[in-house]
Every structure is written in C-alpha cells, then in structure tokens.
Image (cartoon, coloured by chain):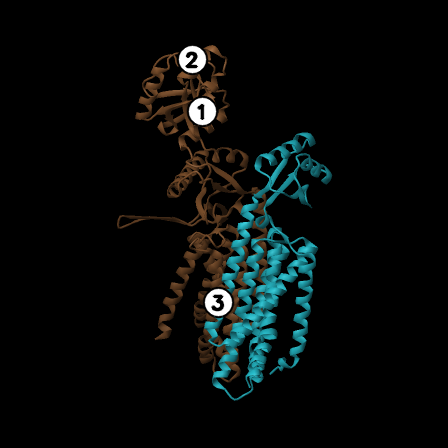
Amino acid sequence: MKQKRKPFRVIFFLIILFFIIRIDLPENVPLKFRIGNLKIDSVIRAAEIDFNFFGIRVKKDFKTRLGLDLKGGSHLVYEADTKALPSGDVEDALISSRDIVEKRVNFYGVSEPVVQTVKSGTVSRIVVDLPGVKDVAEALSFIGQTAQLDFKEESVASSEAAIATDTPLILRLTKKTGLTGKHIKKATVQFDQNTSNPTVALVFTEKGGKLFEEITKRNVGKPIGIFLDQLPLSAPTVQQTISGGEAVITGNFTVDEAKKLAISINAGALPVPIILREMKNIGPTLGQKQVQQSVLAGGVGLSAVIIFMIGYYGILGVIASGALLIYGLLSFAIFKTVPVVLTLSGIAGFILSIGMAVDANILIFERIKEEIRRGKKFDSAVRIGFTRALSAIKDANITTLLVSFILFNPLNWSFFPQFGVVRGFALTLGIGVLTSLFTGVVVTKRLIEMFYKDKLKTTI
Amino acid sequence: MINFLKYKWVYGVISICVIIIGLFSVFRYGFSFSIDFIGGSIVEYKFDKKIDEKTVRAFFNKEKIKIFSLIVESDHTYLIKTESVDEKKEGIVRRLLETQQKTHIETLRFETVGPIMGRETQQKTVFASLIAIVGIFLYLTFAFSNFKYGLAAIVAMIHDFLVVLGSYSLLSHFFGAEVDTLFVTAVLTSLSFSVHDTIIVFDKIREYRKRDTITAFSVLANKAFTETIVRSLNNSLTTMLMLVALILLGGASTRFFVSALLIGIITGTYSSPFVATPLLDMLERRKR
C-alpha cells in the first residue's frame, strides 16, 4: 500500500516546490543564453495571478516589497493640532486630513505612498511614508500646508477710509466673501497668453460660480484678494461681472510654485493644522548596500549552518539542510504573498529565524539518536523521536511567538510601540517560527520517508 | 553521565562576576541613547571631495546647531548627531557647505525626532517589554504548573537580562553602541530564547520525574543535562553562525543589534543548565 502511494507524494511535493520557486524568482532579471541552436532572450517577471473565478476577479502579484530603509525614501510623522476642535469632531477631521494628505502625495507623483493615522493617547498623528523621494524639503513644503484658500473683499468702512488715508491694498481686504477653496472644482496651471507667466486657472463648482458672480458684480472697479493660509496670493481689480464660473490667479509664480498651488487647491484644505514631529530620510544608496550585505551574510551563515549540520549528523544533516532550504524558499514566498514589507531589521529577524529553524531538527535528531542508543530499530526510533520531540518544540516556540506577537502589535494598540523597525523584525521572526515548525517537523518527516528509508537500514 | 551539578559554585561565581562587571559599567558609564528615545537629529553626508572635520563642525556651529557626535566614515562620509533640527535649518547648513566649500553633498540620511516623540517611545517600549516579560512568566507558570520550575526559569531569565544589559553598556562605552528600539528588540528576543532553552532542559527533567519519583533530583538533573547539552550547544551554534555572519558581513546599522542578540543567545544557552538547573536543584532540596 505505502509503496504505491509514494510516486503521488513525490509529484505533489515537486509541484508545490515548483510554485514556491516560481514565486521566489527575482524580478526583472534579464535571461540571455543559448543552448545549441536554441536562443533564449527574455526577462524574468514577478509572478502574477490574474483570472476570473465565477465572475470574481482574482488579481495578485508577488513582488518583493522593500521598506524605506532599504529602498530609500522618507518617513514623516505629523501631529494634528486638534486643540481648537470640539472632541466629537476630532475623528472626522483626522480622517479627512489623512485623505487630503494622501491626495497631495498622489498628485505629487510618489509611487506606493503609505498615509495612515495613528492615535496615541490624546494625540493624533498622521504618518506618511514616501518611498523613493529624494528632495524631502520640497515634499514637506506642500504636505504640511493647511491650504485654506480665501477670497476677500474690502469692507465698506475701509474702502471709505482708503480715500482719506493711504492704507496698503492688502490690509484693506479684510471682509470674507464666503467663497473658499471648498467651492473650487478644479485648478490647473496655465500660461498667460501675453506675458507667458504661469498662472493658476480655477473652475468653480456651481455654487461657487454663483457666489463668484455675485462678488464680482458688487465689486466692479474694486480689488478682490485671494489668500492662501492668510497670505495674499494676488489682488486683481474686477473689470466686469464674471459669470461662467471660472477665474485665473496671476501672481508672481514660478512654474513650480504654480504647480504646487494647483495641487494644494485640488487636494483641498486641511481641516486642522499639522506639525512635523519626526522625519527619517534615507538615501537610496545606503539601502542598496545594506541589502547586498545582508544577502551575503545570510548566504554565508546558511552555508556554515549546512556544513555544520552535515558534518555532525551525516545523512540526517543532509535532510535537515534540505528542509532548511525549503524553509528559506517557503518563508520568502510567504513574505512575497502576504506581502511583508522587508526592512533591515526584518531581514535580521529572518536570518535569526533560520538559525532557530534548525532547532526543531536538532531536537528531533537527538531524540532519534537517543532512541537508537536504547536499542530501538530505526523505524520506531524515528516515530518515537518525532512524537517525543514535538512537546518540547511546541513549548519552546510558544514564547518566541508570544514575544513577536507583542512586538508586532497587530491590533495597533496605542500603548504598545507602533514603530516600523520593531514590527518588521517581529513579523518576519513570527512568520519564520511558524514556517519552521512546519518545515522542521512535517517536511523533515516526509523527506526522511522519501529518500532515507532504504539507505538507513544499511547505514545504522 | 556528566555530574555537572558538582561544580555549582563555579557557575555561580562566573555568573556573579559577569553581572557585577556589567552593572559596574551600567552605573559608571551608563548608556548613550538613540534619538528615538531622547529626540535629536542625525545627518549623514557624503561629500564628493575631502572636507575637513573641523570645517563641517564650524558650519553647524555657525547656525547654532549643537553637535552631539561626529563620526568620520569612509569615502568622505560624515555621520553627525545633533540636537533636533528641522529640514529648513538642515537645508541651510547643507547649501552653505556646498557653495562655500565648492562641493556636492549627497544626503544619505536625515532623521529628526522631536523630544516629545522620544519620551513617548521610551514609555511605550518599557511598557511593551514589561508586558512581554509578564507574558513569559505567566506562560511558564502555566507550562510547568509548578511554581519552582517557573521561578528557576525566571531567575535565569533575569540573569540573562542583566548580562545583556551590562555587556551592552560596555559596548556602548567602548564602541559607541546606542540604546535604541532595536536593542530593546534584541533584549526581548534573547529573553524568549533563554526561556526556550530552559524549557527544553526542564521538560526533560519533568519527564524523568514522572517515571521515577525515587531517585534524587540531582541525579535526574545530571541525566537531563547530559542528554540535552548536545542539542543545546548545536542549536545555539547554528543560531550563532548566522549572527556572526551578520556581524562580520552585514550592514553597519544592525551590527550592535546583532551583537546584543549574540550575547543574549550565549548567555541564554549558558543560563539554562548552569543557572536555572542548579537553582531548581536547590529549591527541590529545600523541600526535604
């Protein structure tokens, strides 16, 4: 019976292994070689799933996701100043602030940004991760902007006073018209036809258009001020009533400034001011070097472990090494599937877990040896060794899992650390320990059954 | 069978010596904390030509930015730790350096943490560590349902904690290692490793005890030691191989973290047979 089932197991095992390796393959590696007359020239791409399953679209890609410390980029922590708000509105204000920051970041053209809110006691924060951004100062200058756009007109009193005194124009524009950034549908950068200076063209919403029409109607011949965060942008004098719901801001903009202004207006104003509390900016070269070093260290360490295991346990060591390699491939495939964002500390956690993964094998092997010393046959020694070792393996790994659970803080409790470095480590360590339980026990047992059984009766 | 319990007092002396040296260092030198904990800024500049260290310092001083430390790395690269500055002030210094020294600067890294964030991180880390330790304690009590086993394992864990803390203070003083969130992670991992190892030995003792209630405890302990020591050493050795590879070949920013882990693994392996088991033996004896 058992002999007959064997080929199926082997095939099943190989199919699974094939999928794991397919997921693990690196991305965008050019493949160019020739075998005889066959010329191969293609690029390895990340594995992708994209199909319709009874009308449900299943789409997933398996890419390696690197953290900011490896890819380079900026990590920003803003604190929302919610003091002025009634406590019931804080939550809403925070969420809409996050959305607006996200919009700004997207308009700015950052790929895969992460914007999230983090509450810590009474303090509300917005955390922004911008991979691959080089010029942080520029990114900061518009992320943190409140971007309250205001249209103001002269109050009646001050326009009369203006005749008598010589108050500067800007100071006379004090009366709010009620027209704000909220009433703008779209802002775009355009160029003035006469001067070719960059300008920002506004398209109002329906309500905004009507408001604007009324405002221009009652202010013909008088200036209207356009203010951003209480700072004047421009104060054109109204020539005639403007209906049609469009306007142009001409200031002394550079193209860049005009672009940023358009972005801020499009994204909308922040309901609360936000203050930068923490910033980490890592250049891309530093990360690359670290990745190379870590991969090298991992490779050398792994080889050393394999040499040691084979040297000490002989053929059993070969099997353990096989299980270890499968462990490495499997956990890497899991990292790509979940996906786990790999940080430097995460890689360290993974490398540590490789060392710990061997532990299950060592425990089992020592048990098997012990049983053999007691005079048991190999068959029963393997069986007893596995069962006996299992209780120790289970107990011992629970503490590691416990610690990684607390460090990872999966429920994002605000009284626990919420920082990326520790979480990356805890996540890879946790996944590593769970995977190693599987490969160390199940895979090793299968491997022993598959390759080792006949040979063993002769060697021991 | 190895009668390792015979040399109990030797282990005691070794442990006490290591801990005393460590604690001396903690009280004498203390630790240097990373900006994550106390707030501050780190800038790492790479110049395209050689710039004098004094010149770099002078430019920061001119903007009244206090420099805590300046490390000269290779390739005209400087790692400068200062009080907390914002991106505008950093930009001013960088541009001044570029124009007046006629050089191009690549900012490899710029980090700044406000003092409030630092304090908060400190509190949360301490809290999480305490919870983790309480969790381990509860688990041990549950796993062994015997107060003495739990106590012995906890004492061994505290022993390891003190050893790691003390050694890191020495690393901090002589090599400039910093206490940061990664260090805390290393400590917690070491502690869980220590408990892990102790459980393996105790599990064995417990197994013997179930089958055999007559033989003296120390004999069973010696037997358990003999049977688990190979596994213990092999397990630590494989983990240590990985860590040593990381220290020698891995990046500079995880070097101290991995060193702390390595110390933790070594003391964790040591403490199970040489601290926890003798202690359990003593506790068992007292009963009679």
| Residue at position x 61%, y 66% in the image | B266
Q: Do residues under tags 2 and 1 come within 8 Å of each other at their CB atoms?
A: no
Q: CA distance from mark 2 to mark 1?
A: 22 Å
Q: Are marks 2 and 1 on the same chain?
A: yes
Which is in the foreground here, disc 2 or disc 1?
Answer: 2
Specify the amino acid type for callout 2: Glu
Identify whether B86 is placed above or below A3.
Answer: above
Specify the amino acid type for callout 1: Phe
Q: Do residues under tags 2 and 3 come within 8 Å of each other at their CB atoms?
A: no
Label number found at residue B172? none
| Residue at position x 50%, y 58% in the image | B128
Q: Residues within 10 Å of mark 2 (few under 14, many from 20)?
A: few
Q: In brown, which chain? A: A
* Element type where label 2 sits in the image: helix
Residue A162: % across, % down: 46, 13
Which residue in the structure is indicated by mark 2?
A: A160
Residue B77: % across, % down: 66, 42
Which residue in the structure is indicated by mark 1?
A: A227
Q: Nearer the viewer, residue A457 or B124?
A: B124
Q: Quadrant of residue B78?
A: top right
In this picture, residue B77 sits left or right of residue B130: right
Quadrant of the rendering where the C terminus of chain B is positioned: bottom right
Which residue in the structure is indicated by mark 3?
A: A397
Q: CA distance from mark 2 to mark 3?
A: 82 Å
